[in-house]
Amino acid sequence: MQNVHLLVNQLESNFLRFETTNHSVSVGSVGWHIEHSLKTIDQIITACKNSNPSEYQWHFNFKRFLFLSIAKKFPRGKVRAPKIVRPEGEINQKTLAVSFSKVKENMKNWESLDKNTHFPHPFFGILNKKETEIFLVLHTKHHLMIINDILA
């Protein structure tokens, strides 16, 4: 989870530019991409913490294998974020500060979770702890690249 911590810090470094937009890159602002990334991390970690490791069963998923193991990145504009991780309402410094605090708190104790901690991803199927970390890194990097392009 160390890599995710570093990526959260990179998201935080763009905190003050949350209102910046560039519609040729994305309809979402920098703040939208930060908030979406934080909601995704928070929701997934919460789902993993609430999972029952004894219920985890690995199944081959070609899309998971392709994107998490081979491509190691996500194409832009091909998938719409599930409603549960789409930011709603106003995004401002206060809401972002609360989200950063919540995510950092939720990330604590990740290392102590069982290796079969898991969550159901709508595209990649059931991801265990290791696959979840890989997904969170790739997903956060994906949105950091969008943020960097918005700011360029």
Image: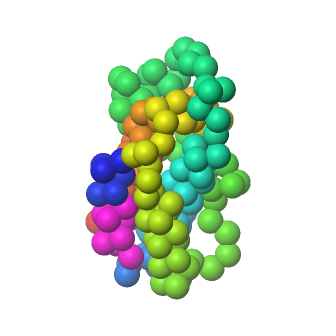
Chain part drawn in magenta: 8-15
Residue 78 position within the rendered picture, expressed as x and y whole percent measured from the top left: 55, 39
Q: Horizontal and vertical percent for residue 10?
A: 31, 63
Name the residue located 66 percent from the left edge and 26 percent from the top edge: 55
Q: Quadrant of residue 30?
A: bottom left
Q: Is residue 13 left or right of residue 134?
A: left
In the foreground, 149 or 86: 86
Asked if the magenta segment contains residue 72, the reply would be no
Residue 40 visible in image = no
- Whether 42 is drawn above or below 49: the answer is below
Magenta span: chief secondary structure: helix
State which quarter of the image contains the C terminus. bottom left
| Image position of 16 (left or right of 102) | left
Pick out the residue farthest to the top: 60
Q: Nearer the viewer, residue 75 or 90?
A: 90
Quarter of the image where one finds residue 22: bottom left
Q: Residue 39 vs residue 8: left or right?
A: right
Whether residue 106 is visible here, answered yes or no, is: yes
Image quadrant of residue 39?
bottom right
Q: Is residue 94 above or below residue 9?
A: below
Q: Is residue 84 above or below residue 51?
A: below
Q: Residue at x 52, y 85 (%)?
A: 94
Q: Position of residue 29 (x, y in %)?
A: 49, 69
Location of residue 126 with respect to 113 vertically, above or below: above
Residue under the image location 44 percent in, 53 percent down = 109
